[in-house]
Image: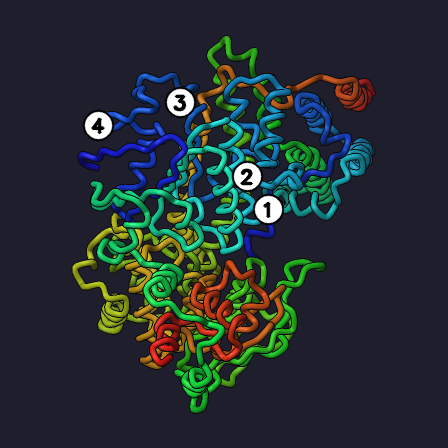
Amino acid sequence: MKDVSFFVRKGERIAILGHNGSGKSTLVKILGGLVEPDEGSCLVEGVDMQNMEFRDLRGKLGMVFQDPENQIVAAMVEDDVAFAPENQGLPSDEIQQRVDSALARVNMTHKQDSSVEALSGGEKQRVALAGALAAKVECLILDEATAMLDPKGRMDIEKTLREIHGEGMTIIQVTHQIEAENFDDIERVIVLSKGGVIWNGETSEFWSKAEELGFNVPDEFKIKKFFADSKVDFATADFSHVKSMFSSELRHEDAGHEVKFSVEGLSFRYDEKNFALRNLDVKIYAGQWLSIIGRTGSGKSTFVQHLNALYKIQSGDIFFDGQSLPQKGNELYGLRQRVGLVFQHPEDQLFSATVKEELSFAPKNAGFKGADLDNAVSYGLECVGLNESFFERNPLALSGGERRLVAIASVLATRPECVVLDEPLAGLDASYQKKILTMLGSLRDSGKTIITITHDINVALNCSDRILILRNGGKITECPPSEAIEEIMNILEPEAWPDVLRASAEIRKLNKDFPLLYNYQDFIKCFSQT
Amino acid sequence: MFLSNVSFGQYVPTGSVIHKLDPRAKLFSLLVIVSAIFPARDFFQLAFWVAALAVLVRLSKISWRVLLKAAQPVFFLVAFTFIFNLAAAYFTGDFAQATYRAFFTSIRLIVLMMFAIMLPLTTAPLELADGLDSLFRPFERIGFPAHECSMMIGMALRFIPLLMHEADKIMKAQLSRGAKLDQGNLFQRVMAFFPVLIPLFIIIFRRADEIAVAMEARGYDGGEGRTRRKPLIWSLNDTKAIVIAALAAGVFFVI
């Protein structure tokens, strides 16, 4: 960090934006009084943090971090929320009061006697939020606090933040992107880059600059702007010709694609009572990109872990290229070479001293030697668009985005025919997300079968050829994106729909000729001809 | 086959009488019971302790299935002792006597560990830490870091399940990259675990760092000046519990 100065008013809600590696994590720690700056100072209500009593400071600033698991210290919800007031040395009855009101504030009173283990990710993060509120802080600092949550969990946190901000809480939100659901509420934006402030101003002015500064502009904002510039009367406008524009426009025809995986009646359970998968029938086509969507616990991960036989088939069948999926022995290792599986946060699984060694791991296991091995390693690196100067570098010293690419490359090195990725975009900033999506698109075009698990409906609809929707371990539907829209609208609340879909659904309410769309370009096209 | 099936004595809240006991009472009773089981010499004594365990499990409303699952890692240890005992007997002669002893030692170990596992199953980690803290307190005078040690044990219990989950995920990821974790001789197998252990240690250190920061952010500054939402209050039931444990243990010392 170098020469950073800014102020935050009491009761203000600001966002500090920065890409991976912009120095925002350091700034969070300094703002939170957890790290002392080398030079300069950080003042709270005119007093330098370094001159404040530890207890006074901690009673003013509350913090919520990215991973709820790393903040919750107790096994039971109430015990955890009590942690901060206990540290403040309050009497027992006052601690209990603080706990009760903090849990009520985040709408978790009904879970007060629950064990933390039994909560969803979003609920855990609300407990972490209550844990900060219980210290009766006046300012909350959130460090990517919603980055690991699913859309539902994110919306719940967002709702709570809006309420406590309305009650006068100062909120500083540090993040790599502004989500559509909260940009109305954030008053000011500060953009960090390479350890310095490069922009500081009102949110309304930020959006016109956003693209220039390297941030995605949410579709919702573009739509609002579009209608602000051109007034359209939806009820009377004629959209009758628009419908035909899209019905003929199927991007990837199914005809001519062979079946890669045929899953027949697959069921799986971890214990006697709970089925993780129920009688699943799915065909996955070669050379196509399948997105699997569904809520947490819908069986997505369990399903894909069957495809390379990490889970053994309990009942039902899976055929791979028409052959029964091998479950053991040497054929199993052959399968794992042909079906590459990239786990969530694959960068956490790197272990080698150099990128080259890391990339050699899978090919070596698959029996590659000599020139074949070298080719495999180069191929992997080339797929993810990194050059050979990375070979001798230490994976742990790379940036988060680069580590993710190396981890994916290490799976691609064996030239698998089919690549399965669990949430490949999680936690990445816009530029790396784009890189990975482009890479997956070109792998698909080169003939590989791509399967991704994603909670980003926008990505599923706009990038993949087919969508599989799971719920409670069962299949809801498996079809091209355009046909999946109605099911998506059925199973998700409107706030979780892609922005364009939400807007087009609203217009459709006024004019039934308007099609349900998910692509911003298509959306704009509808109006260019009226 | 995967590790997430193992629970390693994770807290199971049921709200039973046993759960509500003061952690100090539970720690003390456990100490008494363990020291009584150790010198047990015949199957009659063991049968008594098995019955006592059954009563305890019943009172705690924890199902045997959960207890046995939590005790799973112990069974490996037991199997090891059993085989070791038998092997030793093979060299010393008297096989019948040794088999009996191997059986006896194994069962004693199982009963012992089951009692021990009941403690974390019925006591929330931080509560257990509180209990240890106040039991260790007298040793602070001779420079023993009582609060730090008990907090450490409490945190370890809290985060073990999470780390098991991480280990499981890393294992699956390396298997997906073709790692052969269950093939070859002992040396090869041990070497094959490095791709699992290295990332696991990195994750442990990173988590430890983040947890420490989050704790400080919530005003944790060591045990000094910390109060409790539910301070440890010794009740009649706690006295009863240690008296029952002491009497049960005492009977056999007398005999």
Residue A375 is drawn in which quadrant? bottom left
Query: Pointer 2: what residue?
Result: A127
Looking at the image, is mark 1 or mark 2 earlier in the sequence?
Answer: 1
At 26% from the left and 45% from the top, the residue drawn is A191
Q: Say few, some or many: other residues with alpha carbon within 10 Å of mark 1 (under 14 / 14 to 19 / 20 or more).
A: some
Query: Pointer 3: what residue?
Result: A57
Residue A331 numbered mark, or none = none
Looking at the image, is mark 3 or mark 1 earlier in the sequence?
Answer: 3
Q: Amino acid at mark 2?
A: Val
Q: Nearer the viewer, residue A173 or A116?
A: A173
Query: Pointer 1: what residue?
Result: A119
Q: Nearer the viewer, residue A209 or A471?
A: A209
Residue A434 is drawn in which quadrant? bottom left
Helix, strand or loop for disc 1: loop
Label 4, label 3: how many angstroms apart (C-alpha)?
A: 19 Å
Q: Say few, some or many: other residues with alpha carbon within 10 Å of mark 4 (under 14 / 14 to 19 / 20 or more).
A: few
Chain letter of the residue beneath label 4 in the structure image: A
Residue A310 spot, x, y in % from top left:
51, 65
